[in-house]
Image (tube, grey):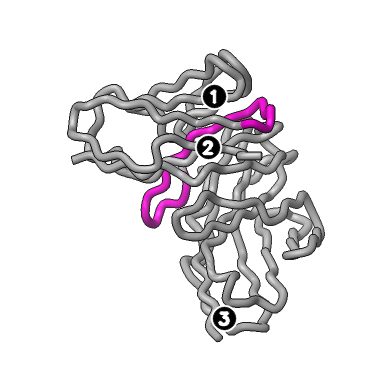
Amino acid sequence: NAGVTQTPKFRVLKTGQSMTLLCAQDMNHEYMYWYRQDPGMGLRLIHYSVGEGTTAKGEVPDGYNVSRLKKQNFLLGLESAAPSQTSVYFCASSRGQRNQPQHFGDGTRLSIL
Amino acid sequence: LAKTTQPISMDSYEGQEVNITCSHNNIATNDYITWYQQFPSQGPRFIIQGYKTKVTNEVASLFIPADRKSSTLSLPRVSLSDTAVYYCLVGFGTDKLIFGTGTRLQVFP
């Protein structure tokens, strides 16, 4: 049972390049989340999804887009990467949004030069 | 303004009890408080969750006062393997889930 799997684990981009981070979960969870983690700031919610085909903005959505075409996958896109997006990105899933524990992947470390 | 506040760091010795507090003044009426543990290069891992009073599981206890404006994670008899960053997660309003900034716990032998 893999839980939550994030791809890739590391990536270096140049300013202006685009890329997509993939999150896959095998727990049949309805809710999925994308966070970014920066030193001294904890985890901040970027976007989340309450089910297949739905997405919503979190605390820091600017510069990111997401898609949830399949229940098990949640994609995070950067259309034009900026140095301020250098961070560690975590995906999580849960059975419910507010009061159910979230299960996290091990993160994608992204550097924008 | 939705905000959670935790101490930045704490030190302890093996075998001691550690209490980490999270302040959350504007918690929503129906929301739970959840605590996570994170090791380097890993995602956060669920520890415990509660709504009010006291909750205990095999690894920790969670104390929540009647006004629910704070919560305290209690780790009994810590070991070196408990060295990690601990986060509280609280819901605010109808669509906000806010993580605290984390407490770095260092356990010494």
Image mark 3: chain: B
Residue extending farthest to the front is: A1
Q: Secondary structure at mark 1?
A: strand
- The residue wearing badge 3 is B12
Q: Secondary structure at mark 3?
A: strand
Image mark 1: chain: A
**Residue A77 vs residue B85: left or right?**
left
**Residue A61 vs residue A33: left or right?**
left
Q: Residue at x 56, y 51 (%)?
A: B44
Mark 1 Cα within 10 Å, few/some/many (few <14, many 20+)? Answer: some
- The residue wearing badge 1 is A73
Q: Nearer the viewer, mark 3 or mark 2?
A: 2
Coordinates of residue A18 in the picture (x, y in percent): 27, 25
Given the image, on which type of amino acid does mark 1 rest? Answer: Asn
Q: Secondary structure at mark 2?
A: strand
Question: How far is the residue under mark 2 from the one under mark 1?
Answer: 10 Å
The disc label shown at residue A62, or none = none
Give the magenta part as a residue range: A26-43
Indicate yes or no whether the magenta region holds residue B26.
no
- The residue wearing badge 2 is A5
Question: How far is the residue under mark 3 from the one under mark 2?
Answer: 33 Å
Query: Does residue A45 appear anywhere in the picture?
Result: no
**Residue nearest the observer in this picture, B5 or A20:** A20
Coordinates of residue A50 in the picture (x, y in percent): 62, 23
Image mark 2: chain: A
Mark 3 Cα within 10 Å, few/some/many (few <14, many 20+)? Answer: some
Q: Nearer the viewer, mark 3 or mark 1?
A: 1
Say whether disc 2 or disc 1 marks the residue closer to the N-terminus.
2
Given the image, on which type of amino acid does mark 2 rest? Answer: Thr
Q: Are marks 3 and 1 in contact (CB under 8 Å)?
A: no
